[in-house]
Image: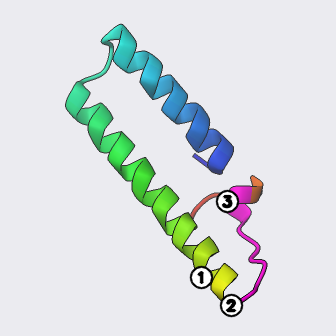
């Protein structure tokens, strides 16, 4: 996963795998949990920038570069 678009695509594929029964539910839950944590860190970064009245450049959201 290199950016937010890929994360969304991966989560959509995960949803399909859950519906098909082709992935272990526990593994799918952990993947969803991890994705939620990634999204929450981005949300915190955006909220912090808003409080500081800044416009952050977040390559992950712009689809430019992968997470470190």
6 or 68: nearer the eye?
Answer: 6
37 relative position to 65: left or right: left
In primary-sequence order, the first of circles 2 and 3 is: 2
Q: Is residue 21 above or below residue 53?
A: above
Residue 60 bears which disc, if any?
3
For the question of whether residue 68 can be seen, the reply is no
Cα separation, mark 2 vs mark 3, equals 20 Å
Q: CA distance from mark 1 to mark 3?
A: 17 Å
- The residue shown at (68%, 80%) is 50
Q: Nearer the viewer, mark 2 or mark 3?
A: 2
Residue 22 on image: x %, y %: 33, 14
The reply to whether callout 1 and callout 2 are in contact (CB within 8 Å) is yes
Tag shown at residue 1: none
Question: Alpha-carbon neighbours of circle 2 within 10 Å: few (<14), some, or many (≥20)?
Answer: few
Question: Eyeballing the image, is 8 above or below 13?
Answer: below
On the image, the x and y values in percent for residue 33 come to: 34, 48
Left or right of 41? Residue 31 is left
Name the residue that disc number 2 marks.
Answer: 52
Q: CA distance from mark 1 to mark 2?
A: 6 Å
């Amino acid at each position: 996963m290199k950016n937010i678009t890929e994360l969304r695509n991966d989560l959509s594929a995960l949803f399909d795998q859950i519906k098909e029964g082709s992935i272990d539910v526990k593994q799918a839950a952990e993947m969803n949990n991890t994705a939620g944590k990634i999204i929450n860190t981005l949300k915190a970064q955006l909220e912090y920038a808003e409080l500081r009245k800044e416009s952050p450049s977040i390559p992950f959201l712009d689809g430019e570069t992968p997470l470190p």
